[in-house]
Amino acid sequence: MTLSEFFFIVFSAIMLFSAVMVIWAKNPVHSVLFLILTFFNAAGLFVLAGAEFLAMLLIIVYVGAVAVLFLFVVMMLDVDFSELKAGFMKNAPLGLLVGAILAAELVGFAGAWVLTPAVAARVAAPSPALNAVSNTEALGLILYTKYVYFFEAAGIILLIAMIGAIVLTLRHKPGVKRQDISAQVARGPATAVAMVKVKSGEFSVPSAEKVK
C-alpha cells in the first residue's frame, strides 16, 4: 500500500463517518461541525486527485464562509427540539420517498458507469487544448466558456435562495423601536414640538403621546 492510498482510505473513512453524523446528530450545532469535518476531508481527497484549486476553494468558500455562517445562524435561532421531533413521523413518508428516489438514481448511475465503460472514459477524457495549461487555468477556461450559462444560472439560484432565507428568518420583535423614514419626513410643528406650561418651582416631563 502506497502513501497516497493510505491517505485516501483515511480521508474517505472520516468523510463518510462525518457525512453520516451530519444527518444522524440530534443537535444542529453538532451537525454543522460534522459538515465542516466532511469538507476538510473532501478537500484532502481533491488534493490527492491533483485538483488543488478545488480543495482550496472548498476550504476557503464552504468552510470559511458557508459552514461558519450555518453555524452562526443555527446558534442564533431558537430551535424547538420538541416540535421537530413531533413533526418527524408526519414527514417520514415524504422523506422516505425522496430518499428512495435518490438511492435509485445513484444505483442507476453507478450501474451505467460500470456496464458502459466507454461512456465513462469519454466523460473523463480531458480536452486536448487544456493539456498544456495548469489545473486552475483549465477549470477557468471550461467554466467561463462552455458552462458559462450554467454558472450564471447557479449564481441566480443562490441569490434567490439567499433572499428567501432572509425573508423567512426575518422576525419583527414587539416593543423594539425602528426608524420610520416616512414619519420623519412628514414631521411638523404639531408632532415635533410640545408646548408645556411649567409652574414655578415644578418640573414636568411631556408624555410620549405629545412628543413623537
Image: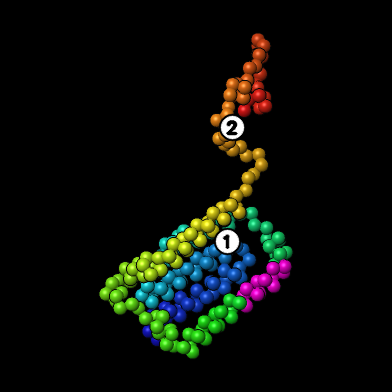
130 inside magenta stretch? no
Query: Is there a contact, CB below 8 Å, between mark 1 and mark 2?
Result: no
Q: Which residue is mark 2?
A: 183
Check the image and report above or below for 186 versus 83: above
Q: Label 2 is placed on what type of residue? A: Ala
Front position among marks 1 and 2: 2
Q: Is residue 34 left or right of residue 143?
A: right
Check the image and report above or below for 169 versus 149: above
Q: Residue 81 appears in which quarter of the rendering? A: bottom right
Local packing at callout 1 (Cα closer than 10 Å; few below 14, some 14-19, many 20+) is some
Q: Residue 89 appears in which quarter of the rendering? A: bottom right
What residue lies at 33% left-to-right and 77% top-to-bottom? 127
What residue lies at 52% left-to-right and 67% top-to-bottom? 35
Query: Residue 176, image x and y in percent?
Result: 62, 39
Q: Is residue 86 left or right of residue 9?
A: right
Check the image and report above or below for 112 versus 165: below
Give me the C-alpha separation between circle 1 and circle 2. Answer: 42 Å
Where residue 29 is drawn, which disc sits there? 1
The residue range painted magenta reads 89-100
Q: In terms of secondary structure, where does tag 1 sit?
A: helix
Is residue 206 visible from the viewing direction of this image?
Answer: yes
